[in-house]
Amino acid sequence: MRVADRIVNLPAYVFAEAGKTLADLKARGVDVINLGIGSPDLAPPQWIIDALYKAALDPTKHGYAGYYGLPVLRKATATYYARRFGVELDPDREIVILIGSKEGIFNVALAFIDPGDVALIPDPGYPTYALGVQMAGGEPVPLPLLPEKGFLPDLSAIPRDALRRAKLLWLNYPNNPTGATAEMDFMAEAVAFAREHDLVLCYDNPYCDVTFDGYVAPSILQVPGARDVVLEFNSLSKTYNMAGWRVGMAVGNAKAVDALARVKTNIDSGIFAPIQEAAAAALLADQAWLQERNAIYQARRDVVMDFLPAAGMKAERPRATLYVWARVPEGETSAGFSKRILEATGVWLTPGTAFGAHGEGYVRISLTIPEERLREAGDRLRRL
C-alpha cells in the first residue's frame, strides 16, 4: 500500500501528537496539567444548550441541513456583525457556515492555491494556515512576527518573488499564539497591500470576544473597502465555549465566499440543524454574559503572569485570547524547556516552535483550565 506524496510530506498535527504523549503519561499515573491546548473548559450558557435540545426534539430536523448553512444562522451571523462591528453583510452572498473555522481555513487553500502558488503565513501562527496550502500543492512563505514590532508582520519585507506568486495573505488578531492585538491603522495598511498585490486577505478572528482590561477587538471588515479583498473567519468555539460543537463562518468578499463554498459543497454536507439553530440563538442573544466569562479568563491570566518570574519566564500581559506567550529561561530552547518541564513536573507547555520557526524561545500557556489547577502548575514550576 502506498499513500500519496502529500501525506508522506505532511507533518503530523502538533496537538494530535501531543495528545498521545499526554495520554501515555496519564496512563502511567502522572498527574498531567495540560496548559497546551486552547479548548475552553467552561460550558456554554444553559439557554444555548436548551435551544439545541428543543431543536433536536423536532423529528424533521435530523436530515441534511443544506450546504451553505441554514438561513436562520446566516441571518443571525449578519445580525451579529451589524451589532458588534457595524458591518452590514448579505446573508445569501457574503456568508457561508463552516464546520468549525478550522475546516474553512484548510479548505480555502483548495479554492485559491494551485501548485507553485504562494500563501503568506504568519510565523508563529496557527499551523492549519500552512498545512492547507501544502495539501493544495502551494508554498507557505513565513511572515516573521517579532516582539520588537509588536508581533505585526513587516509587509514591506516580503521577498519580491514570493509576493509575485502569492494568492493569499493570512492575518490573525487578536493573535494565536502571541496574544498580540492590531490597531485599525495596521488593518487599513494590510487591506491596501492586499488590493495592490491582488491578494485575498484571509483574516482569522475567533478571539475577538475573548478580551480583557476593557479592550474591544475589531473586525478587519470595519476598514473601508475591506470587502473588496477580505475573507474573515470566525467561530463560536472560543466566544461561546462551543469548541466541540464545530460551528463557524467565513464572511466578506462575495467571490471568495462563493469559491470556498464551492469546495465545501463537494466535500461535506453541512452541520446538524439543531446545532445551527442553537448557534443562531447564541449570536442573537444578549451578549452581556461574556463580561463575566472573560473576567474568569482575565483572573487566570493574572495567575500565570504572577508565577512566570519565579519559573524563570517572562511575558507581555495579553489583552485578548486564551494564551500567555512566555519567553523561556535564557539558554533554553522551546522544545527542550517544554520537555524538561513535562518530565519534571507533569506540566505541559506548548513549545513555540509548534507554531513556526519564529516561535523559538517561547512557550504558549493556555488559560483553559480552572484557576486552582493553574496555581498548582505555578507551584510545581516554582519548586523546580
Image (cartoon, grey):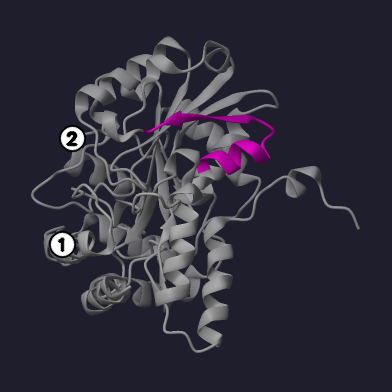
Please name which of the two marks, 1 or 2, marks the residue nearer to the observer. 1
Q: Quadrant of the C terminus?
A: bottom left
Residues 201 and 11: in front is 11
Q: Find the magenta span and give its range.
A: 129-145
Question: Would you call the spot at circle 1 few (<14 residues within 10 Å), some (14-19), or many (20 or more)?
Answer: some
- What type is the residue that disc 1 sits on? Asp
Residues 298 and 286: in front is 298
For the residues labelled 1 and 2, the Cα–Cα distance comes to: 32 Å
What label sits on residue 64 in the rendered view? none
- What type is the residue that disc 2 sits on? Gly
Residue 338 at x, y = what percent?
A: 44, 61
What label sits on residue 86 in the rendered view? 2
Above or below — where is 292 with respect to 328?
A: below
Q: Is residue 121 visible?
A: yes
The quadrant where residue 180 appears: top left
Residues 84 and 32: in front is 32
Q: Quadrant of the N terminus?
A: bottom right
Horizontal relation, residue 120 to residue 191: left or right? right
In the picture of the structure, the residue carrying the numbered disc 1 is 302
Q: Residue at x 48, y 76 (%)?
A: 59
Horizontal relation, residue 38 to residue 217: left or right? right
Most extreme residue toward the left, as rendered? 214
